[in-house]
Structure formats: C-alpha cells, structure tokens
Image: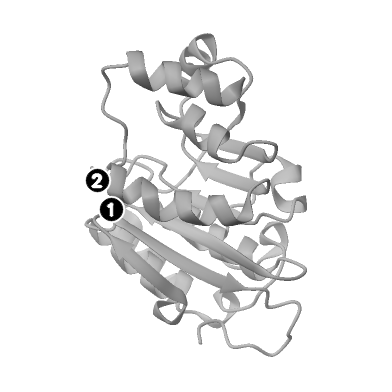
C-alpha cells in the first residue's frame, strides 16, 4: 500500500525532490540491503513517503524543526512518524562549535543525552536515543543562511548515536556537503576514515559500534 501510494505521489507531484536521482540511489542501495530496518531521518519533506516506502516493513522516523510544516505534510501524507525538534544553534556559530567539538569531552562516546559535549543534542524524544538505528540521513535542519540553525549538532549527534549502538555498523548520509558546515562537520565528526562514497552533494559514512569494541579512537 505504501509503495503504491509513493508511486502515485511521485507520478502526480510537480515538486522537485530535495535530492537528485543519483544522490538518492546512494542511500537506496544501502536500504535495499538493510531493509526492513530502523531508519532515522533529519528533516521532513516531499521525499518522506519515498524514504518510508524504501524501508517497507521497517521503522522510519523523521525529526523536523518546523511545526507547521509537519502539519502540512501530515495532511497530505498520513501515517508518517515525525517529531518536532528544536535546535538552539545558528550557522554563524559554526566556527566556535567546531572549536568546541575538538575538545576532549567531545571525543568521548556515550548516550548523547549524557554527553558533556555542547554539540550533542539532548532534546530529542527519548526513544530516539533508545532505538538502535541502522541508517541515518541528515538532510536538516535548515542551513543555507547565517541565522538558520545549521546541521552542526545534527551531524555530531548522528555520529554519536552510531558509535553508541550496541553492535554492528550504522550507515550515515549527509546531504548538501557542497556547503561549509556540512562539509567540515561531516569530515570531522563522522570521520574521513569512515567515508565510503560521495555522489553529488551526498556523502555516505559507515560507522562501527564503539561500544562493541571499547578503546576505538573517535576517528580511525
């Protein structure tokens, strides 16, 4: 039913999705292998039904900064699991946050709620921290102007969630890496050593559990 709905939705919509077909194929390959799985998406958009359908039978959860946008999307597409989240950062603070991220307590792997690192987002619904996520897509919050929240804490927290997983690896995707924040923060906190592929503006990282093997350094 979901797949059927998704096909109709894309056949009748005239809105360009956030990602190109080539970019989408990078994550859809992984979802094909891992689905049904737990899939966490930062951002709710016109492509949300597609992500849910690609993870048919799994659990796909969306984190969205704009409350009215959630209501708008949900009236068009019912049944998506989405939560409103608040970010207290701004793009113009990114250099300062990068400096903070280099401090020792930001290299410690723990539950993001209890991390001493200022970059760790502690205000998501509690189950976000309790679910073992297999795939994470960072395509939000807004980051294209100085006063926007920016993806600094989203990228850092996605990396922490992945490392804090009990076992196995988490595939993390970051979109818009043509921008300074997405480029620098993904390299620093998801680590160039974990980078598997880049296509257009999307980067794919594969991050192993740091709990399963204690003593791993933050980046390989």
User: Label 1 crowding class (10 Å Cα cut-off): few <14, some 14-19, many 20+?
Assistant: some
User: Label 2 crowding class (10 Å Cα cut-off): few <14, some 14-19, many 20+?
Assistant: few
Q: Nearer the viewer, residue 154 or 8?
A: 8
The circle drawn on residue 92 is: 1
Q: Nearer the viewer, residue 22 or 64?
A: 22
**Residue 170 sits in which quadrant?**
bottom right
What x and y, as percent, mark residue 90?
36, 47
Mark 2 = which residue?
146
Determine whether, in the image, residue 33 is placed left or right of residue 20: right
Q: Earlier in the sequence, mark 2 or mark 1?
A: 1
**Location of the N terminus (image quadrant):** top right
The circle drawn on residue 47 is: none
**Residue 199 sits in which quadrant?**
bottom left
Determine whether, in the image, residue 97 is placed left or right of residue 159: left
Q: Secondary structure at mark 2?
A: loop
Q: Is residue 90 visible in the rendered structure shown here?
A: no
What x and y, as percent, mark residue 137?
48, 50
Judge whether 54 appears above or below 84 on screen: below
Q: Secondary structure at mark 1?
A: helix
> Mark 2 near mark 1, Cβ–Cβ under 8 Å?
yes
Determine whether, in the image, residue 137 is placed left or right of residue 55: left
Judge whether 43 appears above or below 112 on screen: above
Q: Is residue 168 visible in the rendered structure shown here?
A: yes
Q: Which residue sits at x=36%, y=68%? A: 197
**Residue 216 sits in which quadrant?**
bottom right
- How many numbered marks are there? 2
What x and y, as percent, mark residue 11?
35, 18
Judge whether 1 appears above or below 81 on screen: above
């Amino acid at each position: 039913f979901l797949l059927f709905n998704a096909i109709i939705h894309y056949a009748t919509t005239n809105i360009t999705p956030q990602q190109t077909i080539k970019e989408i194929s990078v994550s859809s390959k992984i979802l094909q292998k891992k689905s049904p799985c737990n899939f966490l998406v930062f951002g709710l958009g016109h492509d949300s039904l597609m992500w849910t359908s690609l993870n048919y039978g799994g659990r796909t959860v969306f984190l969205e900064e704009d409350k009215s946008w959630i209501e708008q999307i949900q009236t068009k597409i019912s049944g998506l699991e989405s939560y409103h989240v608040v970010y207290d950062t701004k793009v113009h603070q990114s250099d300062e946050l990068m400096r903070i991220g280099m401090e020792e307590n930001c290299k410690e792997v723990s539950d993001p709620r209890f991390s001493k690192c200022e970059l760790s987002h502690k205000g998501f619904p509690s189950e976000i921290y309790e679910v073992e996520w297999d795939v994470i897509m960072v395509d939000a919050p807004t980051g294209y102007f100085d006063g926007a929240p920016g993806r600094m804490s989203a990228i850092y927290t996605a990396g922490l969630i992945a490392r804090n997983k009990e076992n196995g690896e988490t595939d993390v995707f970051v979109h818009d890496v043509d921008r300074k924040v997405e480029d620098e923060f993904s390299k620093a906190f998801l680590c160039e050593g974990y980078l598997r592929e880049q296509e257009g503006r999307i980067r794919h990282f594969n991050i192993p559990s740091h709990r399963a093997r204690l003593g791993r350094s933050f980046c390989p």
